[in-house]
Image (spheres, rainbow, N blue to C red):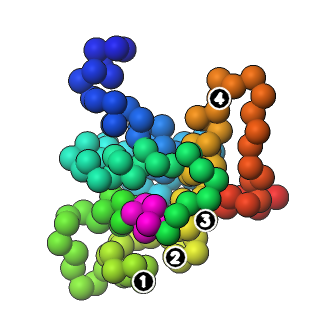
Amino acid sequence: MHNVAAELGSQLCDALPKFHTLTGCNFNSSMFRSKKQAFKRLCRSDLHQTTMSQLGKDSTLSEDTMSACEAIVCNLFTKNEMAGSKQKKLGTGYPVRRIRGSRDYLHQYINQDNFQSIIWRKALGVRQKLPKPEDNGWRM
């Protein structure tokens, strides 16, 4: 396992759990058809890896981090970097094809990803002080 981590690099290793949540896990449904293609794009982008690494550090995402996460989702969703005119836009300037819902849905999804990342970051702690799920994209 240490050899795999060394080959991937610390930045990508830190981004992987957040990427797993963003692309669908037991806690979030999947927005993507292929994790393999999304993973290849993550590996090619240092910016995406840096952004994913920011998730889970704070319960409130900055506007910059939210915008960067929107860009990641849009980049992972499109089949190629040059989007056609038939693709819809979220209002962020990034093209999206086949995305469910609206920009509000996307923000809720990213907040859920951030919340799950907080839980995983604190998983080894004896007493976890966690933010309220209701304040992080979940509805009770």
- What residue appears at the point 60 percent right and 50 percent down from the top-left corner? 58
Q: Is residue 24 visible?
A: no
Mark 1 or 4: in front is 4
Quarter of the image with the C terminus is: bottom right
Between 57 and 133, which is closer to the camera in this rendering? 57
Q: Secondary structure at mark 3?
A: helix
Which range is magenta? 64-70
Sequence-wise, which precedes: disc 1 or disc 4?
1
- Circle 3 sits on which residue? 108
Residue 17 vertical position relative to residue 101 in the rendered view, above or below: above
Task: Write down the residue under mark 4.
Answer: 123
Which mark is first along the chain, 1 or 3?
1
Q: Residue furthest left?
A: 82
Q: Which mark is residue 91?
A: 1
Q: Which mark is residue 103?
A: 2
Horizontal and vertical percent position of residue 93: 33, 80
Residue 53 sits above or below residue 101 on the image: above
| Disc number for residue 42 | none
User: In the visual, does 70 lie left or right of 5?
Assistant: right
> Which corner quadrant of the image does residue 127 belong to?
top right
Q: Residue at (24%, 50%) from the top-left corner?
A: 45
Total numbered circles: 4
**Magenta highlight on residue 36:** no
Label 4 is placed on what type of residue? Ala
Question: Contact (CB < 8 A) between labels 4 and 3?
Answer: no
Q: Is residue 43 left or right of residue 54?
A: left
Q: Which SS type dominates the magenta stretch? A: helix
Tell me the residue at 42%/48% (across/down). 52
